[in-house]
Image: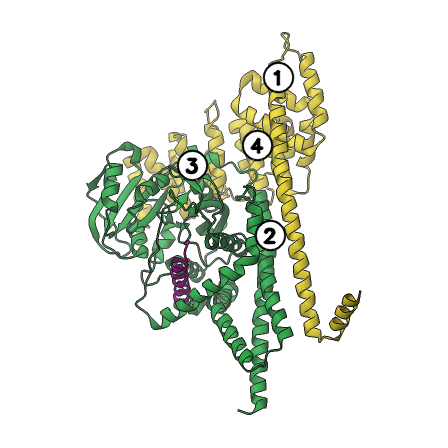
Amino acid sequence: MDSSTAQIIIEIFHYLFFTCSVLAILSYIILSVISARETIEYVKKNSFVNYNHILSSPISPSITIIAPAYNESLNVVENVRSLLSNHYPNYNVIIVNDGSADDSLEKLIEAYDLEHIDYEVNGKIETQPFRRGVFKSTNPAFEKLIVVDKENGGKADALNMGLNISESKYVACIDVDCLLLEDALQKMIKPFMEASDHKVIAAGGVIRIANSCIIKGGKLIEVNLPKNLLVQAQILEYLRAFLLGRMAWSRLNGLLVISGAFGIFDKSIAIEVGGYDTKTVGEDMEIIVRMRRYMEEQNKKYRVAYIPDPLCWTEAPDNYKTLISQRNRWTRGTIETLRKHRKIAFNRNYGKFGLISYPYWLVFERLAPIIELTGLIYFGILVSFGMVHWEYAVLFIAIAYFFSVLFSTVALYSEELTYNQYKKRGAGYRLILLCFIEPLILHPVVLYAAIRGNIDYYFNKKKKWGAMERKGMASAETN
Amino acid sequence: MNIYQHLLEFFNETPFLIKFAIIVVVVMVITIIVLIISLKMIRSLLNIKDKEILGYKKEYEALVVEYLFSEAQTGELSDKQHSIILKIKEDIKVIPRRKSVITVLSSLMNEVSGEMSDAIQTLYHKTGLISYAKVRLKSKKWHLVAKAIGELRRFKIHEVQDEVSKYINHPRVEVRKEAQLYLVHLFKFKGLNFLDDLELPLSEWHQLQLLEALLNLEDQKICDIKPWLKSANISVVLFALKLVKVYNQFELKDTLVELLSHPEKEVKLYASVVLNKLFGYEVAASLKPNYIN
């Protein structure tokens, strides 16, 4: 290769990385502006909503909370108690014990006076069979509770079992270890009931991090900022993702994912599309993409709603190993979903879904880690050959770093003006400091996990979920 | 000064792209600093505001309770009550104080009834709070209009019925919902007459709130639902069907059977649900042809 060819290749790389960076920065700026408008609109709209009407209404729609549990023996009894303490008048809870090897079922039987009942399942979606079957409580205080014990089939399979058993119009699919606030269901059902000229097919909520928060009797008593730096960094990351990213995509009706930790679905549509895909580790994203695709193909007007109120709190990984495993899975889930539905990409028949949402996810979620890694390798090569124009490189890195800090600060700003959860003295300073160090302590790990996810997807097909080590929110970290 | 000049010279000599990047970095750093300072200020301001509002609430709670228990034996306003009205009238010129008074009075309105409720209404009138609400009723900002209607509903202000009725077909759902709730809360079943003129859809969320308002009325003597079962507005028909179901309107059986042939699938389905609930097997013969078709 002569020097002029090498020069052309280098030029191409320069322009490629420059374009990607400019596009990323522009997209974040646009999303921030849109989310600001949507947040203001949401706050205005909800400043005079009375949610109490639904609590005594004879026409409140029925909701089933479906919570899959796999080896959750440590906290399952407490977690179920939390799910049973919701204020919504017309709901029930289905706990699907997905072939747990521990004593989860025994603990539930004992704590809630469960007894086996004969139950004929309308198998609208194919699932793994029952193991010990369906249980209901003999105690009227727990009449809302149904426990299903089935053979292990994974989270998606357990959720499908719940969809088969539920008799409600709507289903709330949640992680059993999540803490749902008492008014969560009435707030989440509102967008479904408000829609008059379109159908709301699903609604997602904000997920907040519960590590170090004080939780008693299944209720959130006090919100604290954890001392663990990794968890703190994830708090900032979640604020950015939920208050800026998803809020903006909600405004554009372009949400492609509802967190698996908490989302409500129109059950009939979820069943019509065949329920959760058991072959992917990103079932939460996949079902939303499939439901949207179905509605687009049916030419029906629809929305995926989003509620920014902090309604669901969950435990975040507090060590690098668990975090990497979680993010690795998220990456594989994204790849699987986007590949499965690649027909949508840049397809005008799918409208904004095909022309904006899907391409955005493809470039800025799916390909971003690969582009970033390529950039780093390229930079390394230039350094080793002494070809780096340092003044350009330093400024390029500075722009990337300060933009990241700026974006996090905007997210903090949004949080402060809306839900302001971290009110304790000193928390504000710590969160600001975090804006500066988060790009250094969390981003490299997330990038590494995403690259590992790509490698595992292509070269380690057997890899599935990976274990999520739980400490339990009742005994959340105090370090 | 030398350093400054040196930096300036360096900046002028650098290529355009570097200059541009330096400007971007400087702008971002300044923005971050401004945001952090304002974040700190907002945090402090919010804390102060929270404490201030809490103080106002305590102050006005005590004042309003004093007002309620200072009534003269004659039924007229006592001197004490006059002085409280004057104080509040003066205070509410300050917006946060006005908001606090409204919050205190609203929560009291929810808890009391009868003479106490009338006394709060009098206080609302005499302090001039009603005038502020009437001004907001004409605002160009939809959320101020909606809030004003909600406030007038809570304080049972009948005299703005005409102004509020104009909003029943407002393009913002929040405004028309508040207007319709106002009519039902204050004028009971008669307030439902807005359904005759409703051109826009009535969402399920909204229907639920209207139904709740109706179910909480003392007098449960329902008006004639039949015309709404024949409305051209599908959501009105569906709401009327809910009323038929909740209020057991057996005499509307024939109209319900007619609805089984309604062109809208949702209406047909709900009519059959209502028929089934009210008449059970009795209507099986009417339902059958629809299933066959």
Alpha-carbon span between mark 4 and mark 1: 29 Å
Real-space Cα separation, disc 2 to disc 3, in angstroms: 39 Å
- Give the labeled residue for mark 3: B242
Residue furthest to the top in view is B73
Query: Which residue is label 4 attached to?
Result: B182
| Residue A461, image x, y percentages | 32, 69
- Looking at the image, which is closer to me, A225 or A152? A225
Give the structural element (helix, strand or loop) at label 1. Answer: helix
Residue A201 percent coordinates (x, y): 43, 52
Q: Earlier in the sequence, mark 4 or mark 1?
A: 1
Q: Nearer the viewer, mark 1 or mark 3?
A: 1
Q: Are marks 2 and 3 on the same chain?
A: no
The single residue placed furthest to the front in the displayed view is B2
Q: Left of A125 or right of it: where is A361?
A: right
Q: Nearer the viewer, mark 4 or mark 1?
A: 1
How many marks on residues? 4
Name the chain letter of the residue that bears numbered label 2. A
Q: Colour of chain B?
A: yellow
Question: Which percent across, then down, holds residue A407?
Answer: 58, 57
Instruction: Give the answer, above or below, for where B72 lies relative to A146.
Output: above
Magenta stretch encompasses residue A321:
yes
Whole-number angstrom distance, CA of label 4 to CA of label 2:
31 Å
Tell me the kind of residue under disc 1.
Glu
What residue range appears in magenta? A317-337
**Is B172 positioned to the left or the right of B217 in the image?**
right
Q: Quadrant of residue B181?
A: top right
Callout 2 amino acid? Ala
The colour of chain A is green
Check disc 4 and give the amino acid type.
Tyr
Instruction: Kindly identify which residue carries mark 1.
Output: B66
